[in-house]
Image (tube, helix red, strand yellow):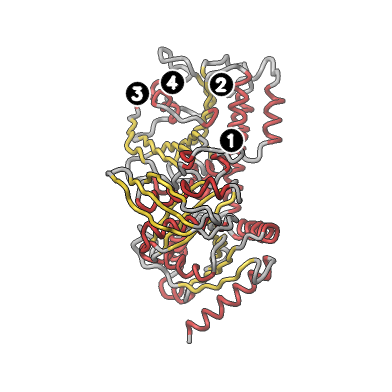
Amino acid sequence: MNLDELELELRRLPGVIATAFDVHESSIYVQLHVAGNIGSGPGPGDAARIAARHTDRPVEIEIVRTSARTNGAAGVGDVRRMIRFEHDELVVDLASIEARDDASGSTAPWSSSARPRLLAVLSFPESDELEVHVVHEGRRTIGRSQTSRGLDGAVEATIDALRQLGASTTAHTRWARTVDHDRNAVLVAVAIDGVVADAGTHYGLAAGSSPIDAAARSTLDAVNRRLARLL
Amino acid sequence: MGSGPGSAGDDDRTREVSARSRPEAPGTEPTDLSRILATSESGVAIIYGALDCLVEEFDLEDAFVVLDAPGAGRQVFRAGRRPIATDDEAMLHAPTGIYTQPQLAGNAFDANLLLSSCLLALRLDWIRYDAGHDPLTGLDGRRSFDRLLDMAVARSNRYGWPFTLVLVDLDDFKVLNDTFGHQAGDDALRDLGERFRRALRFGDNAARIGGDEFAMVLPDTEPELVPVLLERVRTAPGLESPCPEFSFGTAICPTEADDAAALFALADQRLYAAKAERRR
């Protein structure tokens, strides 16, 4: 990721006065200070789309709007008294979703950071397309299946993405079930056969923001430790 | 945070350093700035490099540069790219200058040189950006796209990473221009550009490469998925106007061609075949 390029493109958005970043290993926080009222200038969607072109990490966008311009000749102290700041939007736009595959425990030398990680689960109901984006050591793959296949589809798309990373596996879904859910999260369990020959069934359990998201995470939970050694 | 010149009584932790000042003892500052200018790859990097250098050199808590760049409007940079908290927000409307916390004496460093360098650096970035982008759609321009295609071909040949090149051409663009005027033509191009921006996935790239011609590089995308993707372009959310009609042609690297010119020619040939088919 080139932060300079991202910053320059964000500063090109009309009304943007300042940008700031807080880069973490698993996500990037982007702060945009925008002149003008709500409805003018860029929205979080514009900024998120730009950020998503520059990074595959989850991105948090915060837009802080200033509602008044001041005379450039004023001193800073005067300026502070003249302007009114509206902290009108605090929008978290998860352009992608970070994997929580460290829950499966690590076995050296295949630390959790060396395993395939889930970047995003995208569904396009209008074209019955489901995509699972996975990254491993800088290489990104996209596994595909059908949205209409529900949890099974998410599992299959995840395995497809792992195959494209080079994992030679005949893994297939035995079953995938929603175990529990509330307003914020869904807990899904999966059973996967054929991860490697004669290895029996692998089970995975993970929570996610949606059923298909949780199913993809559960799939990684089930197969990651095995497959990471084969990549 | 801070106070400007002549604003006695305000919090004086930060103040503008006079742009007219000259260093009495330049010390390492010019050398450091030269190093930053010589080694930074972008204007933004130069500005942050200069601010960070200032913070380090004088053991400061913070530093800002406020610029009013022609064509760029007001731009504020904070050392370390750090978020701007409520206490610092006044800096967004401060006069052009360099602000430090704690305040430095006006002759501590050559503020004029530093400010000019930052302004020039930002201007250079703006010019570089404009050179690589299409002003109408905001997408990559032809030059950027050619470079991108060359890189994609090189990666494909080296690592075997496949990608599909898609050429898109608006249908009856001349008729649109002649009937409804060039403004309508520009609107159609802008609309399609926005649709590409909204519909394409991370890693996909779209560019406007000619009058009404667009091109896309879609990594790891089989050609049978291209119509699905283009349908997503046609039905991109949040756009009320109907999508302009277009035709397209594809070519796959490396299976169908493994150099940029041949890929382009193949996709172009298929594009015109699709157009001819449509006219029948």
Q: Are marks 2 and 1 in contact (CB under 8 Å)?
A: no
Q: Are marks 3 and 1 in contact (CB under 8 Å)?
A: no
Give the amino acid at mark 2. Answer: Ser
State which mark lies toward you, 2 or 1: 1
Q: Mark 4 falls on what kind of element?
A: loop
For residue B1, which numbered disc appears in the image? Answer: 4
Give the amino acid at mark 3. Answer: Arg
Tags 3 and 1 both on a single chain: no
State which mark lies toward you, 4 or 2: 4
Above/below status of B160 relative to A225: below
Q: CA distance from mark 2 to mark 1?
A: 16 Å
Sequence order check: which comes first, mark 1 or mark 4?
A: 4
Q: Nearer the viewer, residue B72 or B147?
A: B147
Q: Chain of mark 1?
A: B
Q: Nearer the viewer, residue A14 or B7?
A: A14
Sequence order check: which comes first, mark 2 or mark 1?
A: 2
Q: Nearer the viewer, residue A24 or B36?
A: A24
Place of residue A160 in the rendered image (x, y in percent of width and height, measured from the top left)? 51, 59
Mark 1: few/some/many CA within 10 Å (<14, 14-19, 20+): many
Give the amino acid at mark 1. Answer: Leu
